[in-house]
Amino acid sequence: MIRVLVADDEPLIRAGIRMILTSADDIDVVAEAGNGREAVENARGTAVDVALLDIQMPVMDGLTALAELGRVAPNVRVLILTTFGERDNVLRALGHGGAGFLLKDSAPDELIHAVRAAAAGNAYLSPAATRHVVDALSSPGATARAEQARNRLDGLTTRERDVLALLGEGLSNADAGRRLHMSEATVKTYVSRILTKLDCDNRVQAALLARDAGLHPGDV
């Protein structure tokens, strides 16, 4: 079972999310919180696989809670759930190690899919959030970021670059393994090595770095 924590300051929203998620046979909502501080404390004291955090919450907002969770519960995968789709929020969430970003008007099936993807170690961005990331990558500062990203990739071996290119497209370890004719366990080892070399907290950050550097699966 995928153990989920839901944090939102509106009880009706939490109830709705719980109803959607528990309709899936493999998901269980094990904790709820009305603010970011409660979410961090609950994640510290409860076995949680995925946390769904609203951005706009009292006491501690979702982005601050995301950063705190990275310190006190690094194994918890965090999805940011909000009505606000501003580019800065999306990029901040990913920069702090978030596993993905969803808007509250997402379809129930998309919410379930995102939780499953996060639990499997994959990234998930709603279509609206993806547009913000693409816009940012094509912004005036993109050229400088691309050069910095390419410099960071210099220390990777050819095979590590192959794996990273597929991470940049959001492929799972299993899918990347099939593409590269490698076992899933071997890909997982490569991913861990890549994250260490690039000083990335998670595969989402590595994937964005691959995009910044212009690394594409066509290069594999």
Image (cartoon, rainbow, N blue to C red):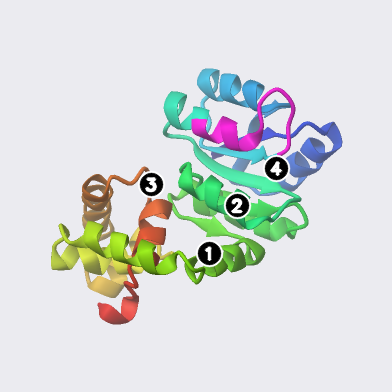
Whole-Å distance between the Cαs marked 1 and 2? 9 Å
Q: Which stretch appears magenta?
A: 56-67
What amino acid is found at the position of numbered circle 1 in the picture? Ala
What amino acid is found at the position of numbered circle 4 in the picture? Thr
Identify the element where label 2 is drawn: helix
Whole-Å distance between the Cαs marked 1 and 4? 35 Å
Mark 1 touches mark 2? (CB < 8 Å): no
According to the picture, the residue beneath numbered tag 2 turns out to be 88
Q: Can residue 137 be seen from the camera position used here? A: yes
Q: Mark 4 Cα within 10 Å, few/some/many (few <14, many 20+)? A: some
Direction right: furthest residue: 12
- Residue 22 image label: 4
Q: Can residue 169 be seen from the camera position used here? A: no
- Residue in the foreground of this view, choosing between 170 and 184: 170
User: Quick one: label 1 or label 4, which is nearer the N terminus?
Assistant: 4
What amino acid is found at the position of numbered circle 2 in the picture? Asp
Mark 3 touches mark 4? (CB < 8 Å): no
Q: Considering only vertical position in the picture, is 171 above or below 92? A: below
User: Quick one: label 3 or label 4, which is nearer the N terminus?
Assistant: 4
Whole-Å distance between the Cαs marked 4 and 2? 31 Å
- Residue in the foreground of this view, choosing between 45 and 99: 99
Q: Nearer the viewer, mark 4 or mark 2?
A: 2
User: Quick one: label 1 or label 2, which is nearer the N terminus?
Assistant: 2
Q: Is residue 62 magenta?
A: yes
> At x 25% / y 77%, what residue is drawn?
220
Direction bottom: furthest residue: 218
> At x 22% / y 66%, what residue is drawn?
161
According to the picture, the residue beneath numbered tag 1 turns out to be 136
Q: Position of residue 36 (x, y in %)?
A: 65, 27
